Amino acid sequence: QVQLVESGGRLVQAGGSLRLSCAASARTFSSYTMGWFRQAPGKEREFVAAVTWSGGSTYYVDSVKGRFTISRDNAKNTVYLQMNSLKPEDTAVYYCAADRSRLITRIEYEYDYWGQGTQVTVSS
């Protein structure tokens, strides 16, 4: 079983930056694909970004390309989401997720473990 704990969410003004962190309990963290998803009020959860086990490949939803960067530090069992040029439409609960396969994916049901989420609110 893998436990994921997100942190870093808060209220920020439009145009600002935040870095989310997700700490994982698993000793095998370095073998998992890691992803970030978000859920805005009244909307379904959507894919944001993913990174392969090595950090060598990343994948983003079009709406965040050029603004968000996903990265990982396997020595610290942590994955990050650097968010720049934030917009009010980025307001959501952000979740990190772990996929035991080594395939990078945006498909929600392919992720095996989920954190509890961290709230990001972007004011206009």
Image (cartoon, rainbow, N blue to C red):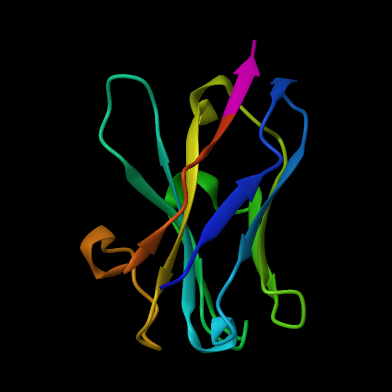
Residue shown at the point (58%, 53%) measured from the top left? 5
Work out whether residue 83 or residue 11 is closer to the camera in this orientation and state it. Answer: 11
Name the spot of residue 42 as percent of width and height, x first.
Answer: 28, 20
Q: Quadrant of residue 107?
A: bottom left
Name the magenta segment's main secondary structure: strand
Q: Is residue 12 magenta?
A: no
Residue reaching furthest to the left = 109
Residue shown at the point (50%, 63%) measured from the top left? 3
Residue reaching furthest to the front = 1
Work out whether residue 59 or residue 76 is closer to the camera in this orientation and state it. Answer: 76
The total number of labels drawn is 0
Residue shown at the point (22%, 62%) measured from the top left? 109
On screen, residue 67 above or below 26: above
Residue shown at the point (51%, 89%) measured from the top left? 31
On screen, residue 66 above or below 84: below
Q: Quadrant of residue 55?
A: bottom right
Q: Quadrant of the N terminus?
A: bottom left
Name the spot of residue 37 as percent of width and height, x first.
Answer: 43, 49
Which region is colored magenta?
120-124
Q: In this image, 55 relative to 15: left or right?
A: left
On screen, residue 73 above or below 94: below
Work out whether residue 114 or residue 104 is closer to the camera in this orientation and state it. Answer: 114
Name the spot of residue 10 as percent of width and height, x first.
Answer: 69, 26
On screen, residue 26 above or below 118: below
Name the spot of residue 78 as percent of width and height, x first.
Answer: 68, 67
Q: Quadrant of residue 124?
A: top right
Q: In this image, 98 relative to 15: left or right?
A: left
